[in-house]
Image: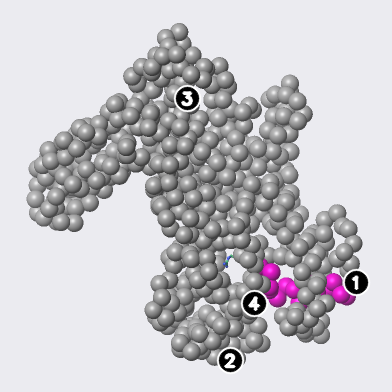
Amino acid sequence: MEAFCILDALNAALLAAAEGWEGFEPELRLADPRFGDFQANGVLPFAKKLGKNPRALATQLLQQAQEALRGLGIEGELSGPGFLNFTLQPELLERWLTAYASAEAFVAGAATLYPGRTIVVDYSSPNTAKEMHVGHIRSTVIGESLARLLRLCGAKVITDNHIGDWGTQFGILILEIKRQHWDLDAPHPDPLAALETLYRDGQARVKEDPQAAAQARQELVLLQQGDPQNFKIWTQVKQISYAAFEAIYRRLDVHFDHVLGESFYRDKVDAVYEQLQSLGIAQESEGALVVFHPEHPRFAKTPFMIRKSDGASNYASTDLATLCYRTKILGAQEILYVVDVRQQDHFEQLFLTANKWFNSMGKTLPVLCHIGFGTILGADGKAIKTRSGGTVKLKALLDEAEQRAYAAVTQKNPQLSEEDRRHIARVVGVGAVRYADLSQNRSSDYIFDWDKLLAFEGNTAPYLLYAVARLHGILRHAPLESPSAAAPLETPHELALAKKLLNSVTALKQSLMELRPHFLCQYLYELSGTFNAFYAVDKVLTSDPPTQAKRVALCRQTLNTLTLGLETLGMETLLQM
Ligand code: ARG
């Protein structure tokens, strides 16, 4: 069986050749294409440690690896003070392309990259009684793409939308609903927007009037004690909120295995308090229950509060109960929290607490990882706002994206039917917003710019979707069954495209290891560029059947790779544009 990951195969060959070299790491990476395909930098530091001549060691390694390299179809070369450059030979490229020509074979290969782990991905997680705003798009699309990536690479992924449906906002909201005699059963064009307004009214009142504030707290206590009227209101608010969230998830093609909101854990927090107290991890302080982390410089003075002084649970209590549930019931070995970096302190304290908790019970804690992301900025470099200064609603943002894309398609292709243009506009509009987000390193803030994200040039969704549509167009004219065997790869553009296709594996791995979708985006962008350069020079539909067979195969594989890559990012593709 042809190795799926050539980089791993090469790494294994070098390690085997370096038998007895205690602690040697080849340190393989992609090379500057002028010198080769891969480069091993590990001999230098290793030689330095032993006080040996690096060139001599590198020569020795190359000799010892010679046979294995020949078997793989890789040529090695010594360079500089002791680097090794490796070039993939055409026969290796051809073997690999043949082995992973079909989407099924590629998917089977990808599933060997990270097999078997049970991973819970916690993402999107908006709060009820409020519309989703632009801040939620990052968690939603980054989380969805990481879930798809991990699944593709062989993990058992469980997605969970940890909606905030048990917070203090309900006291205020219930009070206001009662005060205004708001009828939750009456039909309303945008019920969630109405609830948000009610909540804001309530907030203003509570701020001014201490008596109202006390009443709001009382409403929350009633809710938490199971008062039937308040519980009914709460349930309805939750339904209204979730229906609106679902409409967004449908547009974004986002799916959850579970939607276990904070409220799901309301009867599970007492056990957390008891355990943490009896294990001596949590202690009472000024009426609240807290966990101190004196060993941590940043939290030495601010403990992690896990129960409020009025006895109510909070974000930390439910997160601890959630962690326990995901470990015990869902069997999580890893948990990813895709949440704004501004919540870093919360997660650090949560993880420190969980560590102490599981340690003192002698249990293994799942690998916990906060997948933080930066803020979306407006043109002024500050958090994006509407013209009137309000938060940008996600629904409005997606609507505008579709409208702008519709205008662009209509201008480009007025001859297409209205229905086709609407469909294209939806895929391009939503895809452009999503891709603009995913193509940025998630740790950074980025400036939201309509012109840039809808441009047909550069690392954008329209550019990639256009490459896909173009490939569909080319292949429509190619015969399904080639009448002849493919000729060997030969021209510089054929070889460059073939290598780029093999590098899809490296891109997947890099995205996977760092849990950053932008590496995959960058790769797909480069693949499209390599393909366009190939197509501009090497004629695909030619009168020479063996040449046509090989080039059609390259086109098919490029299309498969682009389609699967975009699907992994959560994006739909188009047959025409
Ligand atoms: N609802 C929270 C918010 O809007 C995000 C929840 C993230 N998940 C978690 N397990 N804490 O900020």
Q: Nearer the viewer, mark 3 or mark 1?
A: 3
Residue 76 screen position, x and y as percent: 20, 35
Q: Disc 4 to disc 3, how far (Cα)?
A: 55 Å
Precedes in sequence: disc 2 or disc 4: 4
Circles 3 and 2: CB distance less than 8 Å? no
**Which label is found at residue 181?**
1
Quick one: label 4 or label 3, which is nearer the N terminus? 4
**x and y percent of residue 408 in the render?**
69, 31
Label 4 sits on residue: 266
Residue 233 on the magenta segment: no
Query: Is 49 left, or right, of 334 in this rendering?
Result: left
- Location of the N terminus (image quadrant): top left
- The residue positioned 70% from the left and 24% from the top of the image is 413
Q: Which mark is residue 137?
A: none
Task: Residue 218: tell me if it is visible.
Answer: yes
Secondary structure beneath disc 1?
Answer: loop
Kind of residue at badge 1: His
Q: Are marks 2 and 1 in contact (CB under 8 Å)?
A: no
Query: Does 475 sit above or below residue 214?
Result: above
Instruction: Identify the colour scheme used.
Output: one colour
Return the residue at label 2: 286
Badge 2: residue crowd in 10 Å (few <14, some 14–19, many ≥20): few
- Magenta segment main secondary structure: helix
Q: Residue at x 29, y 38 (%)?
A: 38
Task: Find residue 555 and name its label.
Answer: 3
- Residue 259 in percent (x, y) is at 64, 62
Q: How many residues crowd around disc 1 within 10 Å: few (fewer than 14), some, or many (20 or more)? A: few
Number of residues whose C-alpha sits closer than 10 Å to that of mark 3, classed few (under 14), some (14–19) or many (20 or more): many
